């Protein structure tokens, strides 16, 4: 079931939305002409309408029970932000220049993590293209773009997105993002996009009004968990897993980085992450182009990167924090929080030789045994860094490691990462020791929500020794 608007050409468009508890759903066309059209309810709560006379650029809402206009949960573009109407997009209209691109092997990736909104003064997809030649000369072979799904306001880390099919309007249009990816491929640079399927942002999040997307029995650091294993879960699983394929296929991405996979809860026979990776692998087989999935995991569990046919989650690679924590604690002397578990040269050596430092041994920080053994697993199955958006932004002052270490120490840390057997990742500016802070930031329009975020960050940092 292809959700949202699907433009078929010749003025024909099909609209589909899942709203199993709604008695009535109507399609409210806004521009260029206002119309209210009934939608037909089908199996499992999917409403559809086939409409003639609709062209790309048409804006619309879905009206629930004859009362409330809401944007399309599967909106492909929100030109007026999270509360405005959705826009019909014709993805087939973009003319790709480099259709022969079929990616590069994962083991050849040298990743550069960047945030579109702060990577250039303009903070747009098109402006970022101006720096691609520089990145290629630097030796970068892959870019990992922090989330670009539509979020409230103009400024945000990206992890408060509420439309998992839509690019952020302040960064540009869908065609602008395609242009960025196309230009990366022109320079033999792969592109992976950071995607969030463990929670949704607070402002502009209307999913609850459409259906039981959330459940209360599990909790995440950001509130109720998404419903991946209870009543109505099939549609929720499809909504998010189809989004993964949507980004890869329509934007010709080389891979996805999946945020905090440990905060997705699923007790079903086929875990949600297996479900996602099955669909991604099917796309790879269909197109003859291997697309990669990268997990951010706090589990230290090799099941994450174990192939699907062997009962694993099927990710191609995963972020490995142990190298970062070992190096950081050794070079800075910090021992607060999770750094209390690190600080010895032996741990760093173990990480370089076998992967996980905590591979089933006791963790004083967690007060339990933690992890399992990763010895013998090939290095391309782990991504390592000496800083990333989390390790910088979740510090009280958002200070980078270049503000804490001497030049010689920075060279030592860089060498340990770059010469490790793993896939190296740099955070934007790291290559020249950028010292500007990169703190967490938002631009919610709800003043009470802004204050709640401020208070939450204060509580989080109150436990640190400053």
Image (cartoon, rainbow, N blue to C red):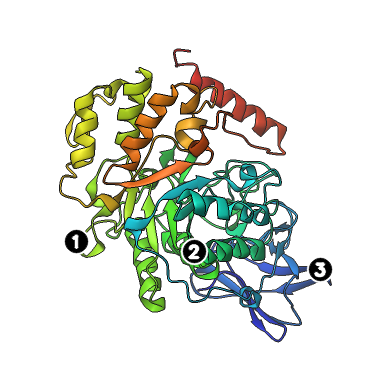
**Given the current orientation, which residue lies at the most extreme bottom position?**
10
Kindly identify the residue that appears in the image at 70 percent across and 74 percent down. 38
Q: Secondary structure at mark 3?
A: strand
- Of the pair 291 and 344, the residue shown nearer to us: 344
Secondary structure at badge 1 equals: helix
For the point 35% across and 30% down, which residue is it? 412
Side of 372 where 85 appears, left or right: right
Q: Earlier in the sequence, mark 3 or mark 2?
A: 3
Which one is nearer the viewer's eye here, 421 or 153?
421
Question: Residue tagged by mark 3?
Answer: 31
Residue 250 in the figure: left or right of residue 329: right
Task: Give percent across and percent down for residue 303.
Answer: 24, 51
Residue at which label 2 appears: 253
Q: Which residue is mark 1?
A: 310
Specify whether residue 78 is in view.
Answer: yes
Label 3 and label 2: CA atoms lie apart by 31 Å
Q: Are marks 1 and 2 in contact (CB under 8 Å)?
A: no
- Work out whether residue 356 can be spotted: no
What distance separates the C-alpha of mark 1 from that of mark 3?
A: 51 Å
* Mark 1 or 2, closer to the camera: 2
- Crowding near the residue tagged with mark 1, few <14, some 14–19, many ≥20 C-alpha atoms within 10 Å: few
Residue reaching furthest to the right? 33
* Residue that appears at 24% across and 31% down: 348
Question: What's the residue at 49%, 37% (across, down)?
Answer: 430
Residue 76 location, x and y as percent? 63, 64
* Label located before the other in sequence (1 or 2): 2
Foreground mark, 1 or 3, reads 1
List x then y, in percent, for residue 156: 62, 41
């Amino acid at each position: 079931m292809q959700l949202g608007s699907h433009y078929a050409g010749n003025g024909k468009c099909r609209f589909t939305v899942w709203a199993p508890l709604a008695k009535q759903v109507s399609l409210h066309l806004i521009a260029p002409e206002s119309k209210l059209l009934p939608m037909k309810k089908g199996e499992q709560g999917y409403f559809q309408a086939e409409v003639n006379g609709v062209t790309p650029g048409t804006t619309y809402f879905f009206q629930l029970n004859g009362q409330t206009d809401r944007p399309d949960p599967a909106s492909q573009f929100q030109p007026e932000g999270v509360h405005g109407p959705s826009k019909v997009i014709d993805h087939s209209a973009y003319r790709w220049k480099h259709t022969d691109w079929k990616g590069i092997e994962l083991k050849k990736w040298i990743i550069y993590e960047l945030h579109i909104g702060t990577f250039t003064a303009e903070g747009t997809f098109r402006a970022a293209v101006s720096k691609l030649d520089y990145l290629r000369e630097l030796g970068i072979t892959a870019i990992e773009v922090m989330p670009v799904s539509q979020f409230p306001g103009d400024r945000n880390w990206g992890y408060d997105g509420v439309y998992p099919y839509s690019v952020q309007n302040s960064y540009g249009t869908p065609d602008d993002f395609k242009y960025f990816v196309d230009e990366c491929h022109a320079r033999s640079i792969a592109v992976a996009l950071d995607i969030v399927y463990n929670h949704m942002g607070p402002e502009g999040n209307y999913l609850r009004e459409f259906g039981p997307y959330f459940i209360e029995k599990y909790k995440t650091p950001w509130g109720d968990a998404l419903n991946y294993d209870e009543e109505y879960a099939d549609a929720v699983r499809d909504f998010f897993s189809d989004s993964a394929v949507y980004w890869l296929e329509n934007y010709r991405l080389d891979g996805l980085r999946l945020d905090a996979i440990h905060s997705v809860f699923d007790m079903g026979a086929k875990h949600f992450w297996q479900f996602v990776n099955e669909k991604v692998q099917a796309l790879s087989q269909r197109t003859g182009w291997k697309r990669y999935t990268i997990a951010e995991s706090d589990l230290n569990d090799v099941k994450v990167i174990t192939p699907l046919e062997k009962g694993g989650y099927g990710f191609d690679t995963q972020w490995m924090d142990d190298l970062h924590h070992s190096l950081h604690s050794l070079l800075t002397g910090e021992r607060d929080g999770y750094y209390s578990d690190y600080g010895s040269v032996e741990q760093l050596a173990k990480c370089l030789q076998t992967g996980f430092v905590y591979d089933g041994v006791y963790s004083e920080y967690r007060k339990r045994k933690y992890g399992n053994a990763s010895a013998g697993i090939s290095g391309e199955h782990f991504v390592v860094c000496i800083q990333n958006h989390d390790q910088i932004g979740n510090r009280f002052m958002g200070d980078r490691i270049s503000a804490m270490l001497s030049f010689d120490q920075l060279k030592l840390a860089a060498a340990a990462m770059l010469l490790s057997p793993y896939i190296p990742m740099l955070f934007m500016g790291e290559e020249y020791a950028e010292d500007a802070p990169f703190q967490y930031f938002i631009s919610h329009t709800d003043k009470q929500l802004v204050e709640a975020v401020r208070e939450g960050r204060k509580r989080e940092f109150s436990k640190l020794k400053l």
